[in-house]
Amino acid sequence: VKQATTITDPASVSICEGQPAMLYIAATGDGAVTYKWAQNGTDVAGATTDTLQFAAITVAQGGKYTATATAGCGPVTSKEAMVNVLTKPVVYGPSEKKISIKEGGLMRFAVATVSDATTKYKWFKDGNAVTNDSSVNQYYTKFDVKIAGDAGKYYCVVSNQCGSTSSDTIEVVVTTGPASVDNGEVAGFSLAN
């Protein structure tokens, strides 16, 4: 009597882009066991062992994986294992490059990103932190703006479990005259007549 081919399914993983990753199955059967792996239904070239390794995983390598083990009684395919490749934040904004704010006025600008529970925002002025890490401060707001303390270059560092990314820099000029904006926008909103 031949022994039926049996396998232990690979486990799903979530891993940051650029990190090593591995999927593994255990298989037994009658005679020698051969293996092949598939990603989203397409065979992975050269993947013919019980272990599928990624030296530095890419977003393109994310997806659903199965392994097929073949022995004397034929092939058996595993259940799908999901490989979820996470990335460091992609940050958009602030949309303005330079704004002029009248002393005593309000300063507010924002960044946008795809976020998750680990996303944190930290705002800087001239390289010095002006906020603490927070999951809720993608906006920077300052009331009663002063010439001496608030003019400068601002940016936000957005981080998650995979790394951090700095936003574009916005230059703030504080004046005693009327407020203005370089590029026709104020805090991400277009000005129209």
Image: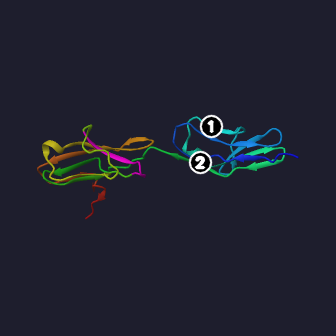
Q: Position of residue 85 (x, y in %)?
A: 53, 46
Q: Looking at this view, is 78 or 57 the one in front?
A: 78
Residue carrying label 2: 12
Report the residue at 32% width, 49% height from top.
Answer: 94
Determine which quarter of the picture holds residue 152: top left
Q: Looking at this view, is 171 or 78 the one in front?
A: 78
Determine which quarter of the picture holds residue 188: bottom left
Q: Position of residue 68 (x, y in %)?
A: 73, 46
Regarding mark 1 in the picture, which secondary structure is present there? Answer: strand
Mark pair 2, 1: CA separation: 14 Å
Part of the protein shown in magenta: 113-125
Q: Position of residue 100 (x, y in %)?
A: 20, 49
Left or right, 56 with respect to 184, comes to right
Q: Amino acid at mark 2?
A: Ser
In the image, is residue 130 part of the stretch drawn in magenta? Answer: no
Q: Looking at this view, is 45 or 50 the one in front?
A: 50
Report the residue at 33% width, 53% height from top.
Answer: 136
Report the residue at 31% width, 51% height from top.
Answer: 137
